[in-house]
Image (spheres, rainbow, N blue to C red):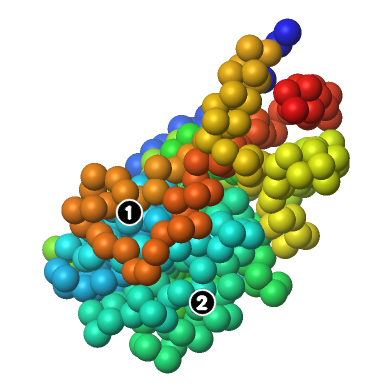
Amino acid sequence: MKPIPFNKPFIIGRELSLIADAVTRGHLSGDGYYTKLCNSWFEEKLHCHKALLTHSCTAALEMSAILCDLQPGDEVILPSYTFVSTANAFALRGAVTVFVDIRPDTLNIDEKLIEAAITPRTRAIVPVHYAGVPCEMDTIMDIAQRHKLLVVEDAAQALLSTYKGKALGTIGHFGCLSFHETKNIISGEGGALLINDMRFIERAEVIREKGTNRSQFFRGEVDKYTWVDIGSSYLPSELVSAFLYAQLERADEITAQRCRLCSAYAEQLAPLEHAGKLRLPRFDADSNGHMFYMLLDSLATRTALISHLKAQGIYPVFHYVPLHSSPAGRKYGRVSGNMQVTDELNERLLRLPLHYEMNDADVARISAAIRDFF
Ligand SMILES: *Cc1c(COP(=O)(O)O)cnc(C)c1O
């Protein structure tokens, strides 16, 4: 039987012709025609003040960490159940990453535990919208305001998800998006920094342009450009931006297809959930169909189910090794409170194949194989 990979990068329409057009335009480094089109797309579609395309979400997180002006020993609060970059970007600035446990229902940071993690050194909170499902942003923004903290949304998985009508990534001071090939909208590697507080725009442009005021120079605001601050090269090439723009043009369609596949999984697997064999993710109209996972009863069941599925050419995956127990997490971070939910759930979570080119028959085949296992 045809293998069903966990993920498959896809082309939806004009990707290759827009790359050819970028070449014809004679500008392939950063901030050309397509990068500007992408930035405007985010600003209009998501209603954010300023969007800056980057070469990855990791880059956007690193820019946020510089913008937070962290001093060595400052603290940043984040979940342990997340991708490495959420923490690494802040550790790079000498900050201590303070890990907080997650909620058992959404696997997002437990907002009720954040306040207990705050110390006089705390500077920022980094909520991660796991699986594109929103964190409790009202509570988090309220805590941040009362303690004068900055909020960096890791919205890597959350493009086109909303919280109370607002696009994820546009609620905190900064929002970081990813277009890595495993995300909903892709450009191979890619990302964007959304800046929702105008005070940070000018410095963000400098940081992204190797610490120079080149953006102001191109706008004619200064007559020469020079080194003015720390920074790095965080711009994507126009080749990447052209590919991305072709996907953004069809972003609603891509998102709808993923949501459809998630609903099909939910329907097919509901009987197993009712029978108490597994737990399915919470799905609301406000999320973007980024991920379909199951929570099984134990690590042993997960291991056995993976072998069962692989034998039939179906390739599920799991993640993350909780950061608080990873070698670098122990070195650069500490926990606040206990990590009970994180430690328990990470061993039981299994992600099912989900990508744009899958269809209902694939979902039916995978679901049947899972029912067969139980
Ligand atoms: C994918 C992901 C990242 C990193 O994105 P890149 O674009 O690969 O740098 C960061 N955080 C989370 C939660 C992610 O899922």
| Quadrant of image for the C terminus | top right
The answer to whether any part of residue 282 appears in the image is yes
| Residue in the picture at 83% in, 46% down | 274
| Quadrant of image for the N terminus | top right
Q: Which mark is residue 324?
A: 1
Question: Relative to 117, does residue 42 appear above or below in the rendering?
Answer: above
User: Which quadrant of the structure image shows residue 126?
Assistant: bottom left
Question: Relative to 79, does residue 3 appear above or below in the rendering?
Answer: above
User: Which quadrant of the structure image shows residue 257?
Assistant: top right
Question: Relative to 341, does residue 115 appear above or below in the rendering?
Answer: below
Query: Identity of the amino acid at label 2?
Result: Lys
The answer to whether any part of residue 43 appears in the image is no
Q: Which mark is residue 112?
A: 2
| Residue in the picture at 31% in, 49% down | 325
Q: Which mark is residue 73?
A: none
- Provide residue 258's location: percent of width, then percent of height: 72, 42
Secondary element at tag 2: helix
Mark 1: few/some/many CA within 10 Å (<14, 14-19, 20+): many
